[in-house]
Amino acid sequence: MGKLVDKIAVVTGAAQGIGEKIAERLLDDGATVIILDVNFEKLERTASALDASGEKVHPMKCNVTDPEDVATTFSAIYEKFDKVDILVNNAGITRDSFFHKMTSEQWHSVLDVNLSSMFYTCQAVIPPMRAQQYGKIVNVSSSSSWGNMGQANYSASKAGVLGLTRTLAKENGSKKITVDAIAPGQINTDMTKDLPEDVKKMATMLTPAGRMGDPAEVASVVSFLTSDDSSFVNGECISVSGGFLMV
């Protein structure tokens, strides 16, 4: 508790699910948290639920696929808070389809949200982080980065996250900036709740833990990676999947 006191954290895709739990955990760790999402109505409800005072959690509408909107949003963040110590790139969507049926829109929309958004947000924070000689960036990948039927777009985007993460870690490690990734497996969220029951059953069978994960369990790993406890962890991807076995 309190290991992130005086830190300013930004979490994308934070209106619900894993992003909301990450924001909650960073708040519990003592950080001031700026939460971003394109759904501002839901984001405001989340912010109010996390911090009724409005002093420690600040919602800001942002379309992370729009480089101009990202630049404007982060400019406002720096103007108000002077710095960003922590960035958690969590925004993500699925548009599942077998590849031979996948449309160009399905491909590009997933790549834009899941991967290109990280390019825009990291470009917004890395120069100031290099100047302040400190920064923690955590990018959310997925166990699907190894490939998954019906998810060519999602798998490609999440594999791309790993390449981006490791490159940024190498380029910025000398400036006391760590860039790591997490790869959640089957987690109970709005994204997975509508999966067919047979798919959920198979995922559970392939998970040694024998169950789906909870968003709070993902948030606990982010808590570690955004704290100074992980000062010598850089360019890594931590699986948060209960030992999920890919087939």
Image (cartoon, rainbow, N blue to C red):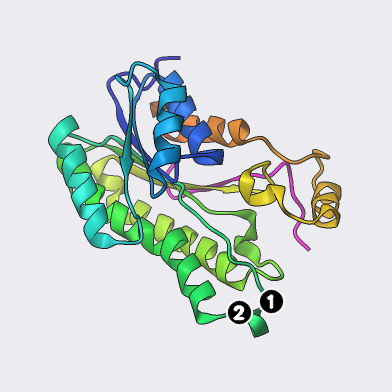
Residue ID at (15%, 42%): 131
Using the numbered discs, state the Cα–Cα distance from disc 1 to disc 2 in whole angstroms.
6 Å
Q: Is residue 156 above or below residue 64?
A: below
Q: Is residue 55 left or right of residue 52?
A: left
**Circle 1 sits on which residue?**
98
Location of residue 4 in the rendering, given as x and y in whole percent from the top left corner: 36, 22
Q: Mark 2 falls on what kind of element? A: loop
Q: Main secondary structure of the magenta part?
A: loop
Q: Which residue is mark 2?
A: 102
Residue 35 or 186: which is nearer the viewer?
35
Amino acid type for the residue under numbered disc 2:
Met
Please say if 221 is above or below 189: above
Residue range corresponding to the magenta coloring? 232-247
**Pointer 1 and pointer 2: residues touching (CB < 8 Å)?**
yes
Residue 82 seen in render: no
Residue 77 got which mark?
Answer: none
Residue 19 image point, x, y percent:
49, 40
Please, what is the three-letter code of the amino acid marked with disc 1? Phe
Can residue 247 be seen in the rendering of this structure?
yes
Residue furthest out toward the front: 41
Report helix, strand or loop for mark 1: loop
x, y percent for residue 56: 32, 22
Quadrant in the picture for residue 118: bottom left
Q: Is residue 230 magenta?
A: no
- Residue 199 in percent (x, y) is at 81, 57
The C terminus lies in quadrant: bottom right
Q: Residue at x 67, y 43 (%)?
A: 187
Q: Is residue 62 above or below residue 57?
A: below
View extreme (bottom): residue:
100
